[in-house]
Image (cartoon, rainbow, N blue to C red):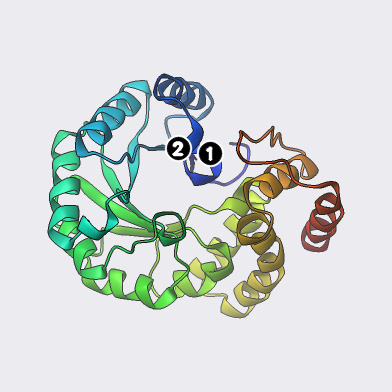
Amino acid sequence: MQTGLRGLLALGSNGEAAFVDEDEAERIVAAVREDVPRDRVLLAGTGRQSTRATIAATTRAAKAGADAVLVLTPFYFKSQMTHDALVAHYRAVADASPVPVLLYNFTAVTAMNMAPDTAAALAAHPNIIGMKDSNGDVGQVAAIVARTPADFAVVVGSAPTLYPSLVVGAAGAIVAVANVVPEVCVALYELVRAGKHDDAKRLQRRLTPLAQAVSGGFSIPGLKMAMDIAGYVGGDVRGPLRPAKPEAHEILARLYEDLVG
């Protein structure tokens, strides 16, 4: 919170939300809220496989201090997650939620994709205020932006495609590498907002190698190691994830120094 980040997401994919117990999830949100000022946004991931469980998790997160919730698409019965099923699910969650809801589309985790038409239908709900799309598909981001109202915030979860996503209308980003180099991510966003596209493209090229290493490359174990390198506290991973191997440290340290050194 000493950086220019607009806020934080607790219980996201990189927060190993899938490995967190239900009672623990509420305590995590409350603990993060203590250090996130009220003039900054605290999001909480509350997606569960059933509508009932998602509503319960959302209610608990709001009670613990979340300003809004990020709800991953249910995917266990993915062949049944049709347009109608997803619309009914999210509308029920939004109807019951004490705080605004953001849709969360992450095909690498769920092996399913929320179509832009589904996002557009849900954007009409007064308590569904935005969507995070982590697929890195700039064309889909553009399609969602085109089909939703101007005040529907489309944020992206792929740092390697951050610049083009902002150009086609994304409102911001929630990306793994922002846990390591938040100032760089904020600077890239501000360059695009200021119309300094040549500078933004150069910064994107410099950011991409580290961003790829802590997302698709070394993934969460590497992200935590990179946070340690940057002077933050990455901490241990939870099983069945395994810690990053020692050789990853040299690679990540070099990428970090190449970017900020």
| Left or right of 158 on screen, residue 230 | right
- Of badges 1 and 2, nearer the viewer stands 1
SS category of the residue bearing label 2: loop
Where residue 166 appears, x then y in whole percent?
A: 46, 69
Residue 50 in the image: above or below residue 158: above
SS category of the residue bearing label 1: loop
Where residue 47 appears, x then y in whole percent?
A: 33, 41
Compute the Cα span from label 1 to label 2. 22 Å
Q: State which quarter of the image contains the N terminus.
A: top right
For disc 2, the neighbor class at 10 Å (few under 14, some 14 to 19, many from 20) is: some
Q: Amino acid at mark 2?
A: Arg
- Tell me if I can see residue 126 in this picture: no
Residue 92 in the image: above or below residue 254: above
Q: State which quarter of the image contains the C terminus.
A: bottom right
Residue at the spot of label 2:
40
Residue at the spot of label 1:
16
Q: Amino acid at mark 1?
A: Glu
Where residue 113 appears, x then y in whole percent?
A: 33, 64
